[in-house]
Amino acid sequence: MIIQVKKIIGLPVFTRSGRQLGRVSDCLIDLDSQSIIQYLVRRGPFGRDLLIHRGQVISIDAQKVIAEDAVMLGAVKAKDQIIAPAVPSATPNLMSHEQS
């Protein structure tokens, strides 16, 4: 299946168990592989943004994104900066993207 990135932006993001995490606000693309590696999820005007690695995404359709329930949180202090791609691993992380 192929979908335009502009149709992913704004989609609500839920965990497998149904907890809403926020909405997709951006995607980080690995230029070497020409694929999305992470999704930036906006948690509202006062919440922390989340970076979800593609390995944590269970499904994407025209209405929503579903991500794994069991995710690890870690702080990243970066706003309006290019964030280095995550190294793919057997246990990808969900990272908190703190707004300054």
Image: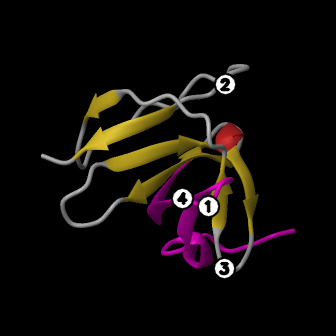
Q: Which of labels 3 and 4 is toward the front?
A: 4
Point 19% across, 48% down: residue: 99
Crowding at mark 2 (Cα within 10 Å: few <14, some 14-19, many 20+): few
Q: Decide which of 85, 42 is in the foreground and name it.
A: 42
Q: Give the range drawn in magenta.
A: 1-28
* Vertical arrangement, residue 83 with respect to residue 15, above or below: above
Point 61% across, 61% down: residue: 18
- Upstream in sequence: badge 2 or badge 4: 4
Magenta stretch: residue 3 in it? yes
Residue annotated with mark 3: 63
Q: Is mark 1 on a helix, strand or loop?
A: loop
Q: Which of labels 2 and 3 is toward the front?
A: 3
Q: Do the residues labelled 1 and 2 touch (CB within 8 Å)?
A: no
Q: What element carries label 4?
A: loop
Q: Are marks 1 and 4 in contact (CB under 8 Å)?
A: yes
| Circle number at residue 88 | 2
Mark 1 to mark 2: distance in Å?
A: 26 Å
* Vertical arrangement, residue 48 with respect to residue 4, above or below: above
Q: Where is residue 39 in the image (x, y as percent from the top left)?
A: 53, 52
In the rendered image, which quarter is residue 89 located in?
top right
Mark 2 to mark 3: distance in Å?
A: 27 Å
Q: Decide which of 66, 2 is in the foreground and name it.
A: 66
Residue sitting farthest toward the left: 100
Q: What is the three-letter code of the residue carrying label 1?
A: Gly
Q: Which of labels 2 and 4 is toward the front?
A: 4
In the rendered image, which quarter is residue 63 located in?
bottom right
Residue annotated with mark 4: 19
Crowding at mark 1 (Cα within 10 Å: few <14, some 14-19, many 20+): few
Q: Decide which of 52, 16 is in the foreground and name it.
A: 16
Residue annotated with mark 1: 18
- Upstream in sequence: badge 3 or badge 1: 1
